[in-house]
Image (tube, rainbow, N blue to C red):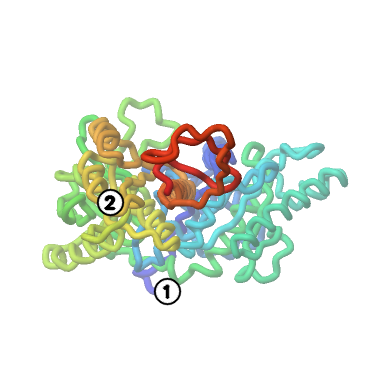
Amino acid sequence: MSEKKRLRTPIVSVLGHVDHGKTTLLDTIRGTFVAKREAGGITQHIGATEVPLDALKSVCKSPLIEKTKIPGLLFIDTPGHHAFTSLRERGGALADLAILIVDINEGFRPQTVEAVNILRRFRTPFVVAANKIDKIPGWKSEKWRPFTEAFKKQNENAQRLLEERIYRIVESLYSHGFSSERYDRIRDFTRNVCIVPISALTGEGVPDLLLVIMGLAQRFLEDELKLQVDGPAKGTVLEVKEEKGFGTTVDAIIYDGVIRVGDTIVLGGIKEPIVTKVRALLKPRPLKEMRVESRFVNVQEAVAASGVKIVAPDLEGALAGSPLRVASEEEIPKVMEEVKAAVGEVRISTDEEGVIIKADTLGSLEALLGELREKKIPVRKADVGDITKSDVVEAATMENEFYRCVIGFNVRMTQEARETAAQEGVRIFLNNIIYALVDDYIGWVEKLKSESERKKLEIIAKPAKIMILPGFVFRRSNPAIVGIRVLAGNLHNNSE
């Protein structure tokens, strides 16, 4: 490998259902390395936690890790959707690898299914962390013990219960098109998803999980991880935030090259790409210095892979999930076109009939758009941001009543939009689970269709068989007034 090329740290995202242990796992990884105060301990980045190789070696204690060329792991701290963007050149995902965390006792839940769909859509390699083994009846825990050691020490009943729960996860993954097995039984890692039983609370199995991730990155991602050390930075905007004393800032993950103070950057904006100069680059203070008044430290440069807060003018309209590029003066027009194309692939505005969709980031928007297209649901407009009055007004103009709605993922709705929707009869769908949103919309359409059919049937004249009751003929004609009994069918007013 040339001097200018080296392997960068793989970027790892943690996805899963709420309360299945995403935060606990990251806290355990962070807390352990901070507590150990290892030489080369973890580094806090904006929106990410870096665990260097030396720190990994101290807990994994395996001869396999001694051979690795990978400098460590960078865990993204933000929600799963933020780790996925429309960056086609990198196969669609900011994350190189993902950990899908599943409560071993609960199995797959709605957000687990959501996460699996995202991973499939973006073709991101992933490992399943079957969490909360410490909650299996009869399981005896020991902190930071490798799983294979822990399993041997359990009684037969605890072992059997763990196996049953693992195979429930295997079945769930199979139903979504993935072949999987417990990691220590896998021979071919290209064909099977690894399931690593862990306890995020006690750290049991976490060394195995880290080792599996390192092994997969080393074996299958070496080319993707080759880094141009001195090249201009490429990254992704994770979040756009107001910071006291700095104004609007962007939190970004840099996955290639280097970004420096004074560099010109190009990133996606609400209307057009934003071109601006970096005024400051900020990183969090080390955890042991968190009590210091200022939460950030100024740095002159950030090298991939790293998370950094960028301070620059004109960031108000920046889009979360958009590409971010460092560009020289002559490269700006070309880079602007690239960024515009990447953002334009997801943000849609057409004159055709269809639903209007809004999402919190470009990654979320692309995932929602993909689900709707799979179901053959046309989309008139797809954009990032909260639902506004103009979205509702546009939805109200749809001729087809099935499209007279706005679908919002992980966004809010302005009060003005709420009032306009009530006045115009526009249906609003809000949810933080994409497939639940799509199901809600399909259910609503089915209900509208049933209602429409019912009304049509009411209009259609149905035959009726009647019998005139003897003794109840009050008038023979103009008009006839008689008492009858309906023997069959339905009789309505104005029936002939």
Structural crowding at the residue carrying mark 2, measured as other residues with C-alpha within 10 Å and reported as few (<14), some (14–19) or many (≥20):
many
Is 333 on the left-hand or right-hand side of 81? Answer: left
At mark 1, the secondary structure is: loop
Residue found 24% across the figure and 30% down from its top: 244
x, y percentage for residue 114?
51, 51
Gap in angstroms between the C-alphas marked 2 and 1: 42 Å
Q: Is residue 180 left or right of residue 358?
A: right
Give whichever of discs 2 and 1 has the lower sequence position. 1
- Depth check, front residue: 86 or 307: 86
Report the quarter where the N terminus lies. bottom left
Residue pushed farthest left? 329
What type is the residue that disc 1 sits on? Answer: Met
Q: Is residue 402 left or right of residue 114?
A: left
Horizontal side, residue 188 vs residue 260: left or right: right
The x and y percentages for residue 100 are 56, 52
What residue did someone put label 1 on? 1
The kind of secondary structure element at disc 2 is strand
Are the two marked residues, 2 and 1, in contact with CB atoms closer than 8 angstroms? no
User: In the rendered view, would you say 289 is above or below 318?
Assistant: above
Place of residue 478 in the rendered image (x, y in percent of width and height, measured from the top left):
36, 40
Name the residue: 29% across, 63% down: 345
| Residue indicated by mark 2 | 383
* Residue occupying the point 61% across, 54% down: 128
Quarter location, residue 136: top right
Q: Is residue 422 visible?
A: yes
Q: Is residue 434 visible?
A: no
Q: Is residue 277 above or below residue 298?
A: below
